[in-house]
Image (cartoon, rainbow, N blue to C red):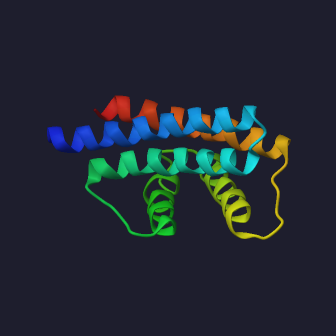
Amino acid sequence: MLSKEILDLANYRLSQAKENIEEAEILFNINKFKGASNRAYYAIFHAIKAILALEQKDFKKHSSVIAYFNQEYISKAIFPKELGRDITNIRLYREKSDYVDFYIITKDDCKIQIDKAKNIVSSVEEYLSKII
């Protein structure tokens, strides 16, 4: 049985993910695609960390969080492989937007990233609802 603290942490992280989606949409609607891409990525990151909270797992590096999720949830078919590919792609877009000089994500690519992030957060929420 999961403790109240663990459940609270998982729910908090999921609420962060949902808030990040809202922020991504707001930024998208005012043509701030770099920020919207960043928020879409963080929605996914916080959703994954909500799952990891149930295992009391945490990592300092984003790459470690995603690698663990891929190893334990994607490769074991708890979540579909397509979802894992989407996570990787959104992470790459976020990194390019944040770290590559003169890189500008297009409106269309940003919209795709937000839609995929919404799908991932929704999938995680559905998974958590079965566990919690």
Q: Quadrant of residue 131?
A: top left
- Residue 106, given in percent of the width and then of the height, sits at 85, 48
Judging depth in this view, the residue of 30 and 91 nearest the camera is 30
Judging depth in this view, the residue of 75 and 14 nearest the camera is 14
Q: Is residue 91 left or right of residue 78?
A: right
Which residue is found at the position 76% from the left and 40% from the top? 112
| Residue at the outermost front position | 30
Q: Quadrant of residue 27?
A: top right
Q: How many numbered discs, if any?
A: 0
Q: Is residue 81 left or right of residue 108?
A: left
| Residue 69 vertical position relative to residue 19 in the rendered view, above or below | below
- Residue 15, given in percent of the width and then of the height, sits at 41, 35
Q: Is residue 1 visible?
A: no
Q: Quadrant of the N terminus?
A: top left
Which residue is found at the position 28% from the left and 32% from the top? 132
Q: Is residue 87 visible?
A: yes
Which residue is found at the position 61% from the left and 45% from the top? 40
| Residue 49 vertical position relative to residue 5 in the rendered view, above or below | below
- Residue 84, given in percent of the width and then of the height, sits at 60, 53
Q: Is residue 53 left or right of residue 43?
A: left
Which residue is found at the position 16% from the left and 38% from the top? 4
